[in-house]
Amino acid sequence: MKNKLFLLFILTMTFSFGQKKEVKKAIKLFNSGDVTGAVNILETNAALFEQAEAKVLNQKTFLEAQIEQANKNFEASYEKYTAFKAAGAVNSDYDAKVQSLTSDIVNSAIEDNAEKRFVDAASKLYLAYTINPETNQDYLYYAASSSVNGADFEGSLKYYNELKEIRYEGITTRYLAKSTETGEEIEFSETEYNLYKKTKEYSDFKVETSESKFPEIVKNIALIYAQLGDNEKAMGAVKEARKENPKDLNLILTEANLYIQLEENDRFEELMKEAIAQDPNNGSLYFNLGVVNAQRGNAVEARKYYEKSIELNPNSESSYLNLVSLILDGEAKIVDEMNSLGNSRADNARYDILKTSREEIYKECVPILEKLIKVSQNEEAINTLMNIYGTLGDNEGFMKMKGLLK
Protein backbone atom coordinates (compact mmCIF):
# COMPACT_ATOMS: atom_id res chain seq x y z
CA MET A 1 0.00 0.00 0.00
CA LYS A 2 2.88 2.33 0.86
CA ASN A 3 4.44 1.59 -2.52
CA LYS A 4 1.21 2.54 -4.30
CA LEU A 5 0.93 5.78 -2.41
CA PHE A 6 4.58 6.55 -3.10
CA LEU A 7 4.05 5.79 -6.79
CA LEU A 8 0.97 8.03 -6.87
CA PHE A 9 2.97 10.80 -5.21
CA ILE A 10 5.73 10.44 -7.81
CA LEU A 11 3.19 10.50 -10.66
CA THR A 12 1.52 13.60 -9.22
CA MET A 13 4.86 15.34 -8.82
CA THR A 14 5.84 14.36 -12.35
CA PHE A 15 2.47 15.55 -13.73
CA SER A 16 2.77 18.89 -11.88
CA PHE A 17 6.37 19.30 -12.99
CA GLY A 18 5.29 18.71 -16.60
CA GLN A 19 2.64 21.41 -16.40
CA LYS A 20 5.07 23.97 -15.01
CA LYS A 21 7.71 22.98 -17.54
CA GLU A 22 5.38 23.44 -20.52
CA VAL A 23 4.03 26.77 -19.27
CA LYS A 24 7.55 28.09 -18.75
CA LYS A 25 8.53 26.85 -22.20
CA ALA A 26 5.53 28.65 -23.75
CA ILE A 27 6.32 31.85 -21.83
CA LYS A 28 9.94 31.70 -22.97
CA LEU A 29 8.90 31.29 -26.62
CA PHE A 30 6.42 34.18 -26.38
CA ASN A 31 9.01 36.47 -24.79
CA SER A 32 11.42 35.63 -27.61
CA GLY A 33 8.80 36.75 -30.15
CA ASP A 34 7.61 33.29 -31.20
CA VAL A 35 3.89 33.77 -30.60
CA THR A 36 2.91 30.83 -32.81
CA GLY A 37 5.29 28.52 -30.96
CA ALA A 38 3.80 29.53 -27.61
CA VAL A 39 0.28 28.88 -28.92
CA ASN A 40 1.29 25.44 -30.22
CA ILE A 41 2.65 24.40 -26.83
CA LEU A 42 -0.53 25.47 -25.05
CA GLU A 43 -2.75 23.70 -27.59
CA THR A 44 -0.63 20.51 -27.64
CA ASN A 45 -0.70 20.25 -23.87
CA ALA A 46 -4.35 21.27 -23.40
CA ALA A 47 -5.18 17.95 -21.68
CA LEU A 48 -2.18 18.31 -19.40
CA PHE A 49 -3.45 21.67 -18.13
CA GLU A 50 -7.00 20.48 -17.41
CA GLN A 51 -6.08 19.38 -13.90
CA ALA A 52 -3.39 21.99 -13.31
CA GLU A 53 -3.03 23.73 -9.98
CA ALA A 54 -4.20 27.33 -9.65
CA LYS A 55 -0.74 28.86 -9.89
CA VAL A 56 -0.03 27.15 -13.22
CA LEU A 57 -3.47 28.00 -14.58
CA ASN A 58 -2.98 31.66 -13.67
CA GLN A 59 0.38 31.72 -15.46
CA LYS A 60 -1.30 30.15 -18.48
CA THR A 61 -4.17 32.69 -18.38
CA PHE A 62 -1.75 35.62 -18.16
CA LEU A 63 0.20 34.25 -21.12
CA GLU A 64 -3.00 33.72 -23.12
CA ALA A 65 -3.96 37.34 -22.45
CA GLN A 66 -0.65 38.48 -23.92
CA ILE A 67 -1.02 36.15 -26.91
CA GLU A 68 -4.50 37.50 -27.68
CA GLN A 69 -3.13 41.04 -27.37
CA ALA A 70 -0.29 40.24 -29.78
CA ASN A 71 -2.84 38.83 -32.23
CA LYS A 72 -5.00 41.97 -31.88
CA ASN A 73 -7.88 40.03 -30.34
CA PHE A 74 -8.36 42.84 -27.87
CA GLU A 75 -11.65 41.82 -26.26
CA ALA A 76 -10.41 38.28 -25.68
CA SER A 77 -7.17 39.66 -24.27
CA TYR A 78 -8.98 41.91 -21.81
CA GLU A 79 -11.23 39.03 -20.75
CA LYS A 80 -8.13 36.95 -19.98
CA TYR A 81 -6.51 39.76 -17.99
CA THR A 82 -9.77 40.24 -16.10
CA ALA A 83 -10.00 36.48 -15.35
CA PHE A 84 -6.39 36.51 -14.11
CA LYS A 85 -7.12 39.33 -11.69
CA ALA A 86 -10.47 37.82 -10.60
CA ALA A 87 -8.65 34.62 -9.64
CA GLY A 88 -6.62 36.64 -7.13
CA ALA A 89 -3.43 36.07 -9.08
CA VAL A 90 -0.55 38.53 -8.90
CA ASN A 91 2.00 39.54 -11.52
CA SER A 92 4.27 42.56 -11.19
CA ASP A 93 3.76 43.31 -14.91
CA TYR A 94 -0.05 43.25 -14.75
CA ASP A 95 -0.70 47.02 -14.65
CA ALA A 96 1.88 47.70 -17.37
CA LYS A 97 0.42 45.00 -19.61
CA VAL A 98 -3.13 46.29 -19.24
CA GLN A 99 -1.89 49.81 -19.97
CA SER A 100 -0.10 48.56 -23.09
CA LEU A 101 -3.31 46.77 -24.12
CA THR A 102 -5.17 50.08 -23.85
CA SER A 103 -2.54 51.78 -26.00
CA ASP A 104 -2.72 49.00 -28.61
CA ILE A 105 -6.52 49.27 -28.74
CA VAL A 106 -6.45 53.05 -29.17
CA ASN A 107 -3.75 52.89 -31.86
CA SER A 108 -5.77 50.29 -33.74
CA ALA A 109 -8.86 52.53 -33.47
CA ILE A 110 -6.87 55.45 -34.88
CA GLU A 111 -5.94 53.27 -37.88
CA ASP A 112 -9.59 52.26 -38.32
CA ASN A 113 -10.70 55.89 -38.31
CA ALA A 114 -8.04 56.78 -40.86
CA GLU A 115 -9.36 53.99 -43.11
CA LYS A 116 -12.96 55.10 -42.48
CA ARG A 117 -13.80 51.93 -40.50
CA PHE A 118 -15.62 54.15 -38.04
CA VAL A 119 -17.86 51.53 -36.41
CA ASP A 120 -14.88 49.25 -35.71
CA ALA A 121 -13.00 52.22 -34.27
CA ALA A 122 -15.94 53.09 -32.02
CA SER A 123 -16.18 49.59 -30.50
CA LYS A 124 -12.43 49.57 -29.79
CA LEU A 125 -12.50 53.00 -28.20
CA TYR A 126 -15.41 51.93 -26.04
CA LEU A 127 -13.42 48.88 -24.94
CA ALA A 128 -10.49 51.17 -24.05
CA TYR A 129 -12.91 53.22 -21.94
CA THR A 130 -14.29 50.19 -20.09
CA ILE A 131 -10.78 49.06 -19.12
CA ASN A 132 -10.53 52.09 -16.85
CA PRO A 133 -13.72 54.22 -16.80
CA GLU A 134 -12.20 56.64 -14.31
CA THR A 135 -9.23 57.72 -16.42
CA ASN A 136 -10.31 56.80 -19.97
CA GLN A 137 -13.48 58.88 -20.33
CA ASP A 138 -12.02 60.68 -23.35
CA TYR A 139 -12.15 57.40 -25.27
CA LEU A 140 -15.91 57.15 -24.64
CA TYR A 141 -16.29 60.62 -26.18
CA TYR A 142 -14.23 59.61 -29.22
CA ALA A 143 -16.23 56.37 -29.52
CA ALA A 144 -19.42 58.43 -29.80
CA SER A 145 -17.87 60.64 -32.48
CA SER A 146 -16.66 57.63 -34.49
CA SER A 147 -20.14 56.09 -34.33
CA VAL A 148 -21.67 59.27 -35.73
CA ASN A 149 -19.10 59.28 -38.54
CA GLY A 150 -20.06 55.69 -39.30
CA ALA A 151 -23.79 56.55 -39.30
CA ASP A 152 -24.28 54.14 -36.38
CA PHE A 153 -26.76 56.39 -34.64
CA GLU A 154 -28.00 53.75 -32.19
CA GLY A 155 -24.44 53.13 -31.05
CA SER A 156 -23.58 56.81 -30.80
CA LEU A 157 -26.76 57.44 -28.80
CA LYS A 158 -25.68 54.78 -26.30
CA TYR A 159 -22.25 56.37 -25.91
CA TYR A 160 -23.57 59.94 -25.67
CA ASN A 161 -26.12 58.92 -23.04
CA GLU A 162 -23.31 57.34 -20.99
CA LEU A 163 -21.32 60.56 -21.33
CA LYS A 164 -24.35 62.48 -20.15
CA GLU A 165 -24.80 60.17 -17.15
CA ILE A 166 -21.22 60.70 -15.99
CA ARG A 167 -21.51 64.40 -16.92
CA TYR A 168 -18.37 64.31 -19.02
CA GLU A 169 -16.84 67.77 -19.47
CA GLY A 170 -13.70 66.99 -21.49
CA ILE A 171 -12.07 70.24 -20.41
CA THR A 172 -8.41 70.47 -21.32
CA THR A 173 -5.75 72.91 -20.18
CA ARG A 174 -2.84 74.04 -22.35
CA TYR A 175 0.28 75.72 -21.02
CA LEU A 176 1.90 78.01 -23.60
CA ALA A 177 4.80 80.44 -23.89
CA LYS A 178 6.94 82.03 -26.59
CA SER A 179 10.62 81.30 -27.06
CA THR A 180 12.60 84.54 -26.62
CA GLU A 181 15.07 83.23 -29.21
CA THR A 182 12.73 82.22 -32.05
CA GLY A 183 9.41 83.84 -31.10
CA GLU A 184 7.74 80.48 -31.63
CA GLU A 185 4.87 79.55 -29.33
CA ILE A 186 5.52 76.28 -27.51
CA GLU A 187 3.26 74.07 -25.41
CA PHE A 188 4.51 72.64 -22.12
CA SER A 189 3.40 70.28 -19.42
CA GLU A 190 2.23 71.99 -16.24
CA THR A 191 5.49 71.11 -14.48
CA GLU A 192 7.62 72.47 -17.35
CA TYR A 193 5.48 75.59 -17.52
CA ASN A 194 6.01 76.38 -13.84
CA LEU A 195 9.70 75.69 -14.19
CA TYR A 196 10.31 77.88 -17.26
CA LYS A 197 8.35 80.77 -15.78
CA LYS A 198 11.35 81.30 -13.51
CA THR A 199 13.75 81.65 -16.46
CA LYS A 200 14.27 84.22 -19.21
CA GLU A 201 14.17 81.66 -22.02
CA TYR A 202 10.43 82.19 -22.60
CA SER A 203 7.91 85.03 -22.43
CA ASP A 204 4.16 85.64 -22.93
CA PHE A 205 3.20 82.79 -20.63
CA LYS A 206 -0.50 81.89 -20.81
CA VAL A 207 -2.87 79.13 -19.81
CA GLU A 208 -5.76 78.18 -22.13
CA THR A 209 -8.71 76.19 -20.85
CA SER A 210 -11.13 74.63 -23.32
CA GLU A 211 -14.89 74.90 -22.99
CA SER A 212 -16.94 72.07 -21.54
CA LYS A 213 -18.13 69.46 -24.04
CA PHE A 214 -21.24 68.68 -21.99
CA PRO A 215 -23.58 71.07 -23.88
CA GLU A 216 -22.39 69.53 -27.17
CA ILE A 217 -23.13 66.03 -25.83
CA VAL A 218 -26.69 66.90 -24.82
CA LYS A 219 -27.17 68.65 -28.17
CA ASN A 220 -25.95 65.58 -30.08
CA ILE A 221 -28.38 63.37 -28.19
CA ALA A 222 -31.21 65.58 -29.41
CA LEU A 223 -29.90 65.58 -32.98
CA ILE A 224 -29.59 61.79 -33.03
CA TYR A 225 -33.11 61.28 -31.69
CA ALA A 226 -34.31 63.60 -34.46
CA GLN A 227 -32.26 61.64 -37.00
CA LEU A 228 -33.87 58.41 -35.77
CA GLY A 229 -37.34 59.97 -36.13
CA ASP A 230 -38.14 59.93 -32.41
CA ASN A 231 -39.47 63.49 -32.26
CA GLU A 232 -40.79 63.22 -28.71
CA LYS A 233 -37.44 62.21 -27.22
CA ALA A 234 -35.66 64.63 -29.52
CA MET A 235 -37.81 67.51 -28.30
CA GLY A 236 -37.18 66.58 -24.67
CA ALA A 237 -33.44 66.39 -25.29
CA VAL A 238 -33.44 69.71 -27.17
CA LYS A 239 -35.20 71.51 -24.35
CA GLU A 240 -32.75 70.04 -21.87
CA ALA A 241 -29.82 70.99 -24.10
CA ARG A 242 -31.06 74.55 -24.50
CA LYS A 243 -31.11 74.94 -20.73
CA GLU A 244 -27.39 74.21 -20.86
CA ASN A 245 -26.74 76.49 -23.83
CA PRO A 246 -29.76 78.66 -24.72
CA LYS A 247 -27.98 80.63 -27.47
CA ASP A 248 -26.55 77.67 -29.39
CA LEU A 249 -27.61 78.24 -33.02
CA ASN A 250 -27.60 74.53 -33.94
CA LEU A 251 -29.89 73.77 -31.02
CA ILE A 252 -32.31 76.53 -32.05
CA LEU A 253 -32.39 75.15 -35.60
CA THR A 254 -32.82 71.58 -34.37
CA GLU A 255 -35.80 72.60 -32.28
CA ALA A 256 -37.19 74.60 -35.20
CA ASN A 257 -36.89 71.61 -37.54
CA LEU A 258 -38.73 69.44 -35.03
CA TYR A 259 -41.58 71.94 -34.96
CA ILE A 260 -41.74 71.83 -38.76
CA GLN A 261 -42.08 68.04 -38.60
CA LEU A 262 -44.83 68.48 -36.00
CA GLU A 263 -46.47 71.07 -38.31
CA GLU A 264 -46.26 73.76 -35.65
CA ASN A 265 -45.36 76.62 -37.99
CA ASP A 266 -45.93 79.41 -35.49
CA ARG A 267 -43.32 78.03 -33.13
CA PHE A 268 -40.98 77.35 -36.07
CA GLU A 269 -41.17 80.98 -37.17
CA GLU A 270 -40.48 82.22 -33.63
CA LEU A 271 -37.37 80.06 -33.43
CA MET A 272 -36.12 81.10 -36.86
CA LYS A 273 -36.36 84.75 -35.79
CA GLU A 274 -34.48 83.83 -32.64
CA ALA A 275 -31.83 82.16 -34.81
CA ILE A 276 -31.55 85.28 -36.99
CA ALA A 277 -30.96 87.33 -33.86
CA GLN A 278 -27.99 85.05 -33.16
CA ASP A 279 -26.72 85.01 -36.75
CA PRO A 280 -28.19 87.98 -38.68
CA ASN A 281 -26.03 87.43 -41.77
CA ASN A 282 -27.08 83.83 -42.36
CA GLY A 283 -29.03 83.79 -45.63
CA SER A 284 -30.28 80.24 -45.06
CA LEU A 285 -32.26 81.38 -42.04
CA TYR A 286 -34.12 83.99 -44.09
CA PHE A 287 -34.75 81.37 -46.79
CA ASN A 288 -36.39 79.08 -44.22
CA LEU A 289 -38.60 81.92 -43.05
CA GLY A 290 -39.54 82.56 -46.67
CA VAL A 291 -40.56 78.93 -47.10
CA VAL A 292 -42.77 78.79 -44.03
CA ASN A 293 -44.47 82.12 -44.85
CA ALA A 294 -45.09 80.99 -48.44
CA GLN A 295 -46.68 77.80 -47.12
CA ARG A 296 -48.95 79.86 -44.90
CA GLY A 297 -49.96 82.13 -47.78
CA ASN A 298 -48.06 85.18 -46.51
CA ALA A 299 -46.69 86.11 -49.94
CA VAL A 300 -45.50 89.60 -49.01
CA GLU A 301 -43.53 88.36 -46.01
CA ALA A 302 -42.20 85.37 -47.94
CA ARG A 303 -40.92 87.61 -50.75
CA LYS A 304 -39.19 89.88 -48.26
CA TYR A 305 -37.35 86.93 -46.72
CA TYR A 306 -36.35 85.40 -50.08
CA GLU A 307 -34.97 88.74 -51.24
CA LYS A 308 -33.01 89.13 -48.00
CA SER A 309 -31.64 85.62 -48.42
CA ILE A 310 -30.41 86.47 -51.94
CA GLU A 311 -28.91 89.72 -50.69
CA LEU A 312 -26.88 87.83 -48.07
CA ASN A 313 -26.13 84.82 -50.27
CA PRO A 314 -26.20 85.71 -53.99
CA ASN A 315 -25.40 82.09 -54.88
CA SER A 316 -28.49 80.62 -53.24
CA GLU A 317 -30.23 78.87 -56.16
CA SER A 318 -33.16 77.79 -53.99
CA SER A 319 -33.87 81.38 -52.96
CA TYR A 320 -34.01 82.57 -56.59
CA LEU A 321 -36.23 79.67 -57.67
CA ASN A 322 -38.60 80.02 -54.72
CA LEU A 323 -38.88 83.76 -55.28
CA VAL A 324 -39.79 83.19 -58.95
CA SER A 325 -42.25 80.48 -57.97
CA LEU A 326 -43.84 82.85 -55.44
CA ILE A 327 -44.25 85.58 -58.08
CA LEU A 328 -45.64 83.12 -60.64
CA ASP A 329 -48.26 81.96 -58.12
CA GLY A 330 -50.10 85.18 -58.96
CA GLU A 331 -50.51 83.96 -62.54
CA ALA A 332 -52.99 81.19 -61.71
CA LYS A 333 -55.74 83.57 -60.58
CA ILE A 334 -55.27 85.69 -63.71
CA VAL A 335 -55.43 82.68 -66.03
CA ASP A 336 -58.56 81.38 -64.32
CA GLU A 337 -60.30 84.71 -64.88
CA MET A 338 -59.12 84.91 -68.52
CA ASN A 339 -60.54 81.44 -69.19
CA SER A 340 -63.89 82.41 -67.66
CA LEU A 341 -64.44 85.41 -69.96
CA GLY A 342 -66.81 85.45 -72.92
CA ASN A 343 -66.56 87.28 -76.27
CA SER A 344 -68.34 90.52 -75.43
CA ARG A 345 -66.61 93.87 -75.93
CA ALA A 346 -66.33 94.25 -72.13
CA ASP A 347 -64.90 90.76 -71.77
CA ASN A 348 -62.36 91.38 -74.51
CA ALA A 349 -61.29 94.62 -72.85
CA ARG A 350 -60.95 92.82 -69.54
CA TYR A 351 -58.97 90.04 -71.26
CA ASP A 352 -56.45 92.57 -72.60
CA ILE A 353 -55.99 94.02 -69.11
CA LEU A 354 -55.45 90.56 -67.64
CA LYS A 355 -53.03 89.64 -70.41
CA THR A 356 -50.96 92.73 -69.64
CA SER A 357 -51.00 91.86 -65.92
CA ARG A 358 -49.81 88.35 -66.74
CA GLU A 359 -46.98 89.69 -68.90
CA GLU A 360 -45.95 92.04 -66.10
CA ILE A 361 -45.60 89.04 -63.79
CA TYR A 362 -43.38 87.33 -66.38
CA LYS A 363 -41.28 90.45 -66.87
CA GLU A 364 -40.81 90.66 -63.11
CA CYS A 365 -39.33 87.16 -63.11
CA VAL A 366 -36.90 87.75 -66.00
CA PRO A 367 -34.13 89.66 -64.14
CA ILE A 368 -34.31 87.25 -61.20
CA LEU A 369 -33.85 84.23 -63.47
CA GLU A 370 -31.12 85.96 -65.45
CA LYS A 371 -29.17 86.59 -62.24
CA LEU A 372 -29.57 82.95 -61.23
CA ILE A 373 -28.35 81.72 -64.63
CA LYS A 374 -25.25 83.89 -64.26
CA VAL A 375 -24.62 82.31 -60.86
CA SER A 376 -25.31 78.76 -62.02
CA GLN A 377 -26.68 77.34 -65.26
CA ASN A 378 -29.61 75.87 -63.40
CA GLU A 379 -31.67 73.80 -65.84
CA GLU A 380 -34.97 74.60 -64.15
CA ALA A 381 -34.20 78.33 -64.33
CA ILE A 382 -33.22 78.10 -68.02
CA ASN A 383 -36.40 76.19 -68.90
CA THR A 384 -38.59 78.63 -67.01
CA LEU A 385 -36.95 81.68 -68.61
CA MET A 386 -37.15 80.09 -72.07
CA ASN A 387 -40.92 79.59 -71.65
CA ILE A 388 -41.33 83.16 -70.39
CA TYR A 389 -39.42 84.54 -73.38
CA GLY A 390 -41.62 82.43 -75.65
CA THR A 391 -44.81 83.76 -74.07
CA LEU A 392 -43.53 87.36 -74.28
CA GLY A 393 -42.57 86.90 -77.94
CA ASP A 394 -38.86 87.47 -77.26
CA ASN A 395 -37.47 85.13 -79.90
CA GLU A 396 -33.85 86.15 -79.32
CA GLY A 397 -34.09 85.37 -75.60
CA PHE A 398 -35.93 82.13 -76.34
CA MET A 399 -33.19 80.91 -78.73
CA LYS A 400 -30.45 81.92 -76.30
CA MET A 401 -32.02 79.81 -73.53
CA LYS A 402 -32.58 76.93 -75.94
CA GLY A 403 -28.90 77.09 -76.80
CA LEU A 404 -27.95 76.91 -73.15
CA LEU A 405 -30.06 73.78 -72.72
CA LYS A 406 -28.15 72.11 -75.54
Image (tube, helix red, strand yellow):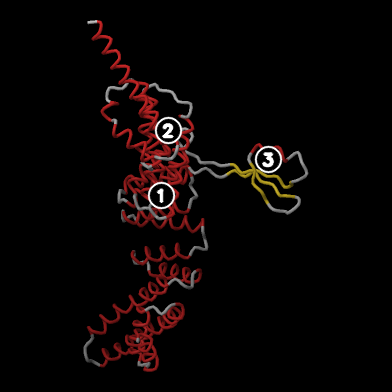
- Dots 1, 2 in contact, CB < 8 A: no
The numbered mark, 1 or 2, whose residue comes first in the sequence reads 2
Foreground pick, 299 / 117? 117
Give the mark nearest the N terminus, 1 or 3.
1
Q: Residue at point 29% right, 30% down?
A: 45
Using the numbered discs, state the Cα–Cα distance from disc 1 to disc 2 in whole angstroms. Answer: 39 Å
Label ID, residue 146:
1
Q: Secondary structure at mark 2?
A: helix
Q: How many marks?
A: 3
Element class at badge 1: helix
Q: Is residue 346 above or below residue 146?
A: below
Relative to residue 76, is residue 112 depicted above or below? Answer: below
CA gap, disc 2 and disc 3: 44 Å
Q: Is residue 146 left or right of residue 340?
A: right
Task: Say above or below: 195 vs 180.
Answer: above
Q: Which mark is residue 28?
A: 2
Along the line of sight, which residue is nearer the eye, 357 or 367?
367
Tell me the amino acid under the disc marked 3: Tyr
Q: Please rate how many residues cluster around mark 3, counting C-alpha atoms within 10 Å: few if below 14, some from 14 to 19, many from 20.
A: some
